[in-house]
Image (spheres, rainbow, N blue to C red):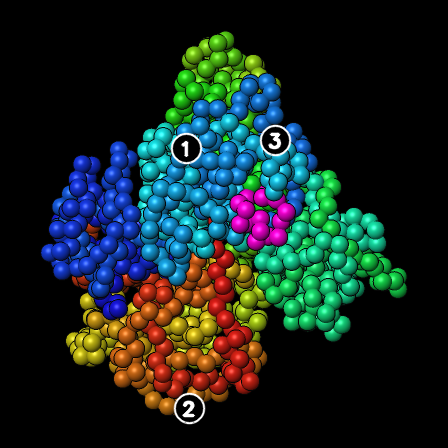
Amino acid sequence: MQLAGILSSLLLATQALAIVRRGAPADAPTALKCAFVIDFEQGADGHAILAKHLAGKGLQWSERTSINNKYANFVSVQLVGDCQDAASIFEGLSGATSFSSVTSRPGPQPLASDRKEVPFSDELYHSITGVNDARNKLGLTGKGVTVAIIDTGVYYLHPALGGGIGKGFKVVGGYDLVGDAYSIADPTITPDDDPIDNCSDDSHGTHVAGIVAADARNITTPGYVPAVPFTGVAYEANILAYRVFGCPADSTASDVMAAAIYRAADDGADLINLSIGGGPNYPEEVDTIAAEAVGKAGHFVLASAGNSGAKGIQVTGNPSNSHGGFSVASFDSTVTPSPYSLIDDQPYFYGLGSNNAKFVEGESLDIVVNDLTADDTDLQSDGATNLSKNAKGKALLLRWGATTQGGSSKRCGYALAAGASHCILYGNTDEMVGIAGNAGLPSMFLSRAGGLALIAKVKAGGKPTFIFTTKQREYQIPTAGTISSFSSPGLSLDLEIKPDFGGLGGQVYSTVSDHAAQHANSPDSYGTKSGTSMASPYSAGVAALLLEQRKNNKPSFEDLRAILQNTASPRKIFQSKSYNSVAYQGAGLVNAYYAGQAVTVVTPSAIALKDTDNFKSSVVLTIRNDATEDVTYTFGSFSAATVNAYNVGDDFTLDATTISFTENQQASVEFSTKEVRVTKGQSAQVTVQFNAPEALTPYPIYSGYLQIIPSNQENAIHVPFAGVVGSYKNKAIWSRKSPSLAERWGSQYGLTEQNVATGLYADLDFNPLSEGAVINATLGAGVMAVASSTSRGGYIEILPVVAGPAAKRSNDLEAAGFNTSAPIYARLTDLVSEGNPSSPGLFVPMQRNGYSGASPVVPPTIWAFAGVAYDANGNPALLPSGTYKMKFSAVRNFASASSTKDEDFDIIMSPTFRLVDGAVPPAASSSASIASSTATSTQVATSASTASTAAPSGSAVTSGSAATGSASVATGSSVATGSSAATGSVAPTGSVAPTGNSAASSAVPSASGSTAASTSVPVVIASPTYAAPAPATPTPQPSNLYKAGAVSTFGSVFVALAGAALMF
């Protein structure tokens, strides 16, 4: 594919075109090749219009999916052949209103899977969410309410789910939108009328459905008898099942999701649950738009916030970020009977790894403790460098640690490498953790108490006995009712309050299919999973109880949100007196009883105070009294913990291991009156004044709760508020200075604080680039592009510096095939990912980087620049020798990607450099410390001939997370160490890819203030579809970096980080 054609597909060529583009760019990392959704006016025959239009274009196509009902009218198509210039393809399409690229959504990957834990009793399970009282005092069971489950499908043959489908069954209907074979490898859609899932290994949708509406009481059928009878939250609700994943359950797509949402609404779903999502993003995709459309039409959408709590703030994913949907956080459950094994005849709890659970009932394991001092020294990476030599053929005990040091697969991989027969990870805290383990050997997570018992016996000179059993006993969850550690925090990227509220998602027991039970080596079709995937259906069940209560007066979207938020219970941080931040828990843990009996509605039900520049100092509350009596309301407030996600002198976002929660930097609140009396059926307004705190750390998130106490009920009404101190728009997008990144990420490559900053470097040793220095294209130069914040777009351009006649310089570039009226994007080669893929410096959207781990929020990568950029035809070509600068620009917070204002971009400009081509020996390097720390077999285009032939093809280019949708995110940090503001002399000079609905081709102003004429605009080329492969010519070799024996191991050692598919 050629870059020019790809770029032009982002925008329509002129303002006059009737059809507009929205959503992700045509070549975003998650975009499916040549797949588009076209929206039509109501009443238009989209199929017929497309057939005629595309035939006139001489294009072959097939339909992926379509919807034509009162909520939407769209057709999703798969084009065959040349689809680069989508704007031109769909230009003049009669009756069409907009089009967008189809993007992928990752498959299910719950955090705790197939552990044999079950609720100790139904009463205890629902004891902290008001469900028991809603049933016993209000008589609510969900009867008459229909909940749609959009997921992997539902095994409706399960007795606890009714045993069938259709009229008279619990599962009343549904649809399979994709077919069994649908997957990343084969995205062919073959829909049918049967939404059953008895082939996915996790049975995610069946587990979700059971949380909402299972009734596992009085079941006697062998294989379906639960250890303890239990019920879903709304066990008499009806279920509609929509299957959007195939049997592999590894991926779905935005058009499929949107079609399912619209279909569910048209089929009469009162509530729609989406335990599906991605990383931090803006709510501008077709599925998030669908969620908003149907939600505000009375078909309420609840979606999981995400399982990226370890990554730090602002990682709630789509579609939960929808303005018309509810983002649901996870709180840990209460009590379960859990399986135990016997250590010296004493029971200790465990959970099995979902990748390999092949332990045998009654077997005796020969235990080897990897490190007897690991717990004494708080070792976080047991086994990484201290692997026991005595583990062969035995069960190796390893200490669990911070996930930044690796997950269960990596840790059990140590045991596998040691030749162990089994892997046992014991807890570093009292919390039980659900693990995947390693497929290569049976894997287990053992309670901390169990691990310490084994260690104590060995320390005492004894040999412990370990007998595996599947017997169960009560396990009190110590973190019950507190935010789950994995739950993704907000705020949203635009500082709105997300998540909205939370449900029980930590260690939830529910139904699974027969296939999933067999896969997990389970004797019955039940299992425990953890994730916001579980919290969302729990909250959907609570909402179902509320809708049953109000069946004769169905609430609007705004009222439903207000009631659920008003009546939620703010919870404290585990083992702390401080309330958790609104950024983590929203309004708090849902309460079915309080919601069911609510007769007061307070709006707004959540208050986003924004940042210092946009601070809302005054908010008017409306208090509506729906009671049959007059009510007096008194007012107060309390603060929540302040989230400190940035260190002074460090612009990189901290993760869960380093974020601090403090009781300082809190807002003051003042009401216009201490109390107000409201007549029955009437409303009153009260003004609330906020005063933001002074910042002690960069960009602290402060929050708290307004408290309104009605005279006619026992529970207070709460309204969460949150804000950020500082100018969020002026916050750096590109990282310029981060000692923490250098220590936690750069050190593994020998990089220091000075050379993990975003910018262009003098060479591949990452020495600083001085003004006027020579960069040899044959030898290459290093590039860092670290995103410290998520942005709507990041761009890396090459700017010619004209010292003499401008025409001469322009002519040189034009002669080399470059369009000097359009942006010239650098071609970068990834030195870390396997295969060393190359791509343009375009990242739309650009998800922020983290210190380690899988998608979303992946670590930076290390780029090489070899004097190659993309020419007017979209092919990589060697720049002619001359003087240039490299410009890094990123859309600022709150700004539009289509803006033409300089201040809307965070810009870093490199020093001027002179580019030459030839084998000139490099200057002596001063970076000897980096010498052997990183390896490369990088292939970077080094001549005009190799560059021009290295046209983009289908090879992958994303760094670390192509499969999961986080862009080959710009990775590195900046040469500047000062403020985040753009330098005054620097301005973007190229067109910028919009993410909204603008029909105009928008360009960022050049340094002179004029707008460059261009029909090409940037788009992320970092995708498997349009990757530019590395040429097969000799590669530039650094003088120190990536050297010696490490070179030969590059392919195996520096493999791209596998993206963790997210379904929460």
Q: Identity of the amino acid at label 2?
A: Pro
**Seen in the image, is 854 located left or right of residue 130?**
left
Residue 517 part of the magenta segment: yes
Q: Residue at x 41, y 65 (%)?
A: 958
Q: Which residue is mark 2?
A: 921
Residue 942 seen by the camera:
yes
Pick whichever of labels 2 and 3 is earlier in the sequence. Answer: 3
Q: Which residue is mark 1?
A: 166
Q: Secondary structure at mark 2?
A: loop
Q: Which residue is mark 3?
A: 217
* Label of residue 331 in the image: none
Residue 333 seen by the camera:
no
Q: Residue at x 33, y 38 (%)?
A: 263
Q: Identity of the amino acid at label 1?
A: Gly
**Seen in the image, is 347 located left or right of residue 563?**
right
State how far apart marks 1 and 3 are (Cα): 21 Å
Position of residue 797 relative to residue 165, above or below, is below
Few, some or many C-alpha atoms within 10 Å of disc 2 (few <14, some 14-19, many ≥20)?
few
Q: Magenta residues?
A: 512-526
Residue 596 part of the magenta segment: no
